[in-house]
Image: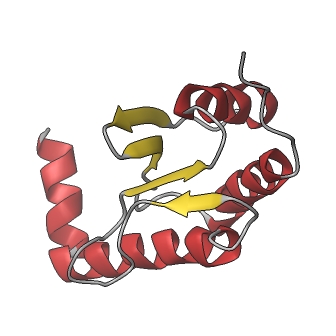
Amino acid sequence: IGAAVDFHNVIGAKRKEDRLRYLKNYWVEKTKDLPKANLYTSLKPQYSCALTCFGFEGWKAQELDAYLYEKHKVHVVSIVHEKVNGVRITPNVYTSTKDLDILIKGLTNFSKQSPPQKK
């Protein structure tokens, strides 16, 4: 814990916040207009920093979660509530744009699939 606190103090809260917001905006801007994409997080800076909830209409969050991990080795967390059905995507300060390009590719490829038929 001490090393994490030291790291935070070295980079500073403002620089950390700026980096996290940049990373979130990097991938969201490239995916928010994918077919049937649902962005559950506001892009207004006062309402979000790094954490974003993202899903696709017609798909369960767990299906997107499983796909991203199985096909692209991207770990996300399924979030399902009354009006939210998506995955939580949260880059860290050390996440690279190259890492996020893998996420973008995964979300783009997923968006090209047809949702499963309801029984």
Side of 104 where 10 appears, left or right? left
Q: Is 89 in front, or is 112? A: 112
Q: Position of residue 73 (x, y in %)?
A: 70, 32
Q: Quadrant of the N terminus?
A: top left
Q: Position of residue 89 (x, y in %)?
A: 47, 50
Above-or-below relation of 53 to 43 = above
Q: Is 112 in front, or is 10? A: 112
Side of 18 where 25 appears, left or right? right
Q: Position of residue 48 (x, y in %)?
A: 28, 71
Q: Position of residue 59 (x, y in %)?
A: 65, 37
Q: Residue at x 38, y 70 (%)?
A: 20
Q: Is 68 in front, or is 114? A: 114
Above-or-below relation of 70 to 91 = above
Q: Quadrant of the C terminus?
A: top right
Q: Residue at x 63, y 49 (%)?
A: 56
Q: How many marks?
A: 0
- Looking at this view, name the residue that lies furthest to the top: 119
The quarter holding residue 110 reads top right
Side of 26 where 77 appears, left or right? left
The quarter holding residue 74 reads top right
Display coloring: secondary structure
- Looking at this view, name the residue that lies furthest to the front: 119
